[in-house]
Image (spheres, rainbow, N blue to C red):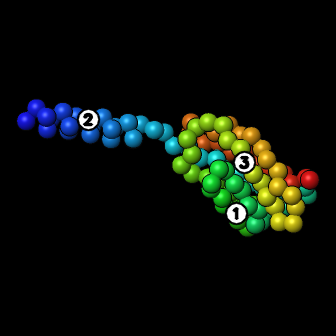
C-alpha cells in the first residue's frame, strides 16, 4: 500500500508541475508603410507559422515567456527577422513592412 501511495504522490506532483507552466501569447498587427493592413503575411516562430488576416492581425498562443525570433515574410518581399521578448501574460508587437 505504501508503494501505491508514493506513486500517487509522484503523479500528483507531475500534474501540478504541468499546470504550473504558464503559457503566454504574442499578438499584433502587421501593416504596410502607408499603414494599410498587410494581409497574407506569414509569421514564423520556430516550427510554428501563421498568416495575418484581413486586418493584418496575427496571434501566437501557448508560448512560454522568453525571447523568440520572429520571421516576418510578406508576399513578394524578402523575409526579415526580429527579436521579441514575450512577457508572462501576453505581449503585443506590431510590425511595419518598410523594406
Marks 1 and 2, the one that precedes in the sequence:
2
User: Which element is circle 3 on?
Assistant: strand
In the image, what residue occupies the spot 76% across and 62% down?
41
Among the 4 quarters of the image, the one containing residue 74: bottom right
| Percent x, y of residue 59 | 64, 54
Q: Which mark is residue 70?
A: 3
- Closer to the camera in the image, 35 or 32: 32
Marks 3 and 1, the one that precedes in the sequence:
1
Disc 3 crowd, CA 10 A, few/some/many (<14, 14-19, 20+)? some
Disc 1 crowd, CA 10 A, few/some/many (<14, 14-19, 20+)? some
Disc 2 crowd, CA 10 A, few/some/many (<14, 14-19, 20+)? few
Could you give the CA–CA distance between mark 3 and mark 2, rounded to whole angstroms? 37 Å
Could you give the CA–CA distance between mark 3 and mark 1, rounded to whole angstroms? 13 Å
Report the mark closest to the observer, 3 or 2.
2
Q: Quadrant of the N terminus?
A: top left
User: Which element is circle 2 on?
Assistant: helix
- Closer to the camera in the image, 42 or 47: 47
Residue 2 appearing in the image: yes
Label 1 close to label 2 by CB (< 8 Å): no
How many labels were placed on the picture? Answer: 3
| Percent x, y of residue 98 | 91, 52
Horizontal side of residue 77 vs 40, given as left or right: right
In the image, what residue occupies the spot 77% across and 66% down?
39
In the image, what residue occupies the spot 79% across and 58% down?
73
Label 3 close to label 1 by CB (< 8 Å): no
Q: Which mark is residue 10?
A: 2
Q: Mark 1 — residue?
A: 51
Amino acid at each position: 500500500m505504501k508503494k501505491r501511495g508514493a506513486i500517487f504522490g509522484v503523479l500528483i506532483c507531475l500534474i501540478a508541475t504541468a499546470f504550473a507552466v504558464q503559457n503566454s501569447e504574442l499578438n499584433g498587427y502587421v501593416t504596410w508603410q502607408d499603414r494599410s493592413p498587410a494581409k497574407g503575411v506569414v509569421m514564423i516562430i520556430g516550427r510554428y507559422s501563421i498568416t495575418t488576416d484581413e486586418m493584418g492581425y496575427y496571434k501566437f498562443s501557448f508560448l512560454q515567456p522568453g525571447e523568440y525570433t520572429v520571421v516576418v515574410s510578406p508576399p513578394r518581399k524578402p523575409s526579415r527577422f526580429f527579436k521579441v521578448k514575450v512577457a508572462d501574460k501576453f505581449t503585443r508587437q506590431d510590425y511595419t513592412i518598410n523594406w
